[in-house]
Image (cartoon, grey):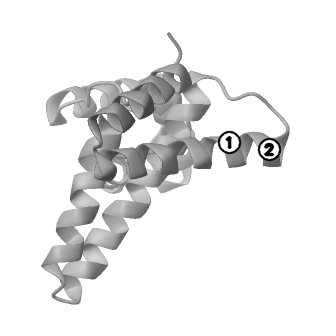
Amino acid sequence: MTLKTRLNDDVKTAMRARDKGRLGVLRMALAAIKQREVDERIELGDDDVMGVIEKMIKQRRESVRQYRDGNREDLAAAEEAEIELLSVYLPEQLDEDALASLVEEIIGATGAASMADMGKVMGQLKARAQGRVDMAAASALVRSRLAG
């Protein structure tokens, strides 16, 4: 079952359950996927759909940060609930130890020695851990490893 099919099935389930919050988030995700398909005139595969969902989660994390800076805990909580709903469609996240191990492996394989090599490391990391890692956290880890 493809990720888009799973999303569509979950929309139907949410409609039957009259779960308006979940339904709204799922419809928004499907609309973003459809928009990208129309814009690029392609049919998105699971990896591309994961990329769209990751982007949506990243936008919501930024919104949470801004809402908290503005003392709007109610809006931050709503965004966090959407993040939780969307995260279900991504693979299980790597823990810190697994991420550190993967970064070390990639640095060793690419021969990266300085910040100039960060792009090579991040490119391989994104290809190997797409959807399983917060790329902002991974970037900070790679940066600290290459700088020190």
Local crowd size for mark 2, using a 10 Å CA cut-off: few (<14), some (14–19), many (≥20): few
Whether tag 1 and tag 2 are in contact, CB under 8 A, the answer is: yes
The answer to whether residue 44 is above or below residue 65 is: above
Which quarter of the picture shows residue 68? bottom left
Q: Residue furthest top?
A: 1
Label 1 residue SS:
helix
Q: Nearer the viewer, residue 33 or 134?
A: 33
Image coordinates of residue 105 in percent, x first then y, are 36, 23
Q: Which residue in the structure is indicated by mark 1?
A: 34
Q: Nearer the viewer, residue 22 or 110?
A: 22
User: Label 1, label 2: how many angstroms apart (C-alpha)?
Assistant: 6 Å
Residue 39 falls left or right of residue 33? right
Residue type highlighted by circle 1? Lys
Local crowd size for mark 1, using a 10 Å CA cut-off: few (<14), some (14–19), many (≥20): some
Q: Nearer the viewer, residue 23 or 114?
A: 23
Residue 10 falls left or right of residue 8? left
Which quarter of the picture shows residue 45? top right
Residue at left 25%, top 26%? 101
Q: Which residue in the structure is indicated by mark 2?
A: 38
Image coordinates of residue 132 in percent, x first then y, are 34, 31
